[in-house]
Amino acid sequence: MAENVENIENVDDVEQADEAKPNVRDHAAPEGSGVACDETVEPVDELDQVVRERDEFLDALQRTQAEFSNYKKRIARDQASLVARAGERLVKELLPVLDDLERALEAANEHE
């Protein structure tokens, strides 16, 4: 580049030389040069992919949390129902015994 500047004799030649230089932003790297021309596109695609993965994981997490919350509610209902049924069963088993005791007390009172 220093060689090109030394060979230019006036300002018009400098402007022409600048116009002749390829603009790196406007041109892709030649094929086989080992320079990837889509370097700015790949990180964006990778970022989009990472964002999609994050959204998928977040969705799965939210669904798992909702399922666990529903599970806890269902277990609480089942336990309440089980306690109610256990109390009911106990009353059904004790009712005949209680009736027998009442009859025994009445019979004992009649004998006195």
Image: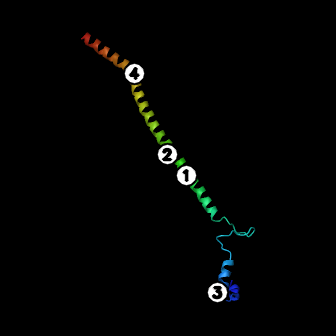
Identify the image quadrant of residue 50. bottom right
Identify the image quadrant of residue 32. bottom right
Q: Position of residue 23 (x, y in %)?
A: 66, 74
Q: CA distance from mark 1 to mark 2?
A: 15 Å
Q: CA distance from mark 3 to mark 1?
A: 57 Å
Question: Of circles 3 and 2, which is in front?
Answer: 3
Q: Which mark is residue 27?
A: none
Residue depicted at x 53% and y 48%: 59
Mark 1: secondary structure: helix
Mark 4: secondary structure: helix
Q: Which residue is mark 3?
A: 11
Amino acid type, mark 4: Lys
Please, which residue is most extreme toward the top here? 111
Residue depicted at x 56% and y 56%: 51
Mark 1 vs 2, N-terminal side: 1
Mark 2 vs 4, N-terminal side: 2
Q: Position of residue 66 (x, y in %)?
A: 49, 43
Left or right relative to 3: residue 74? left
Task: Using the image, determine if residue 47 lies above or below residue 21.
Answer: above
Q: Which mark is residue 92?
A: 4
Identify the image quadrant of residue 92. top left
Question: Of circles 3 and 1, which is in front?
Answer: 3
The C terminus, quarter of image: top left
The N terminus, quarter of image: bottom right
Q: Which mark is residue 55?
A: 1
Mark 2: secondary structure: helix
The answer to whether marks 1 and 2 mark residues whose Cβ atoms lie closer than 8 Å is no
Q: Which residue is mark 2?
A: 65
Label 1 neighbourhood size at 10 Å, few (<14), some (14-19), many (20+)?
few
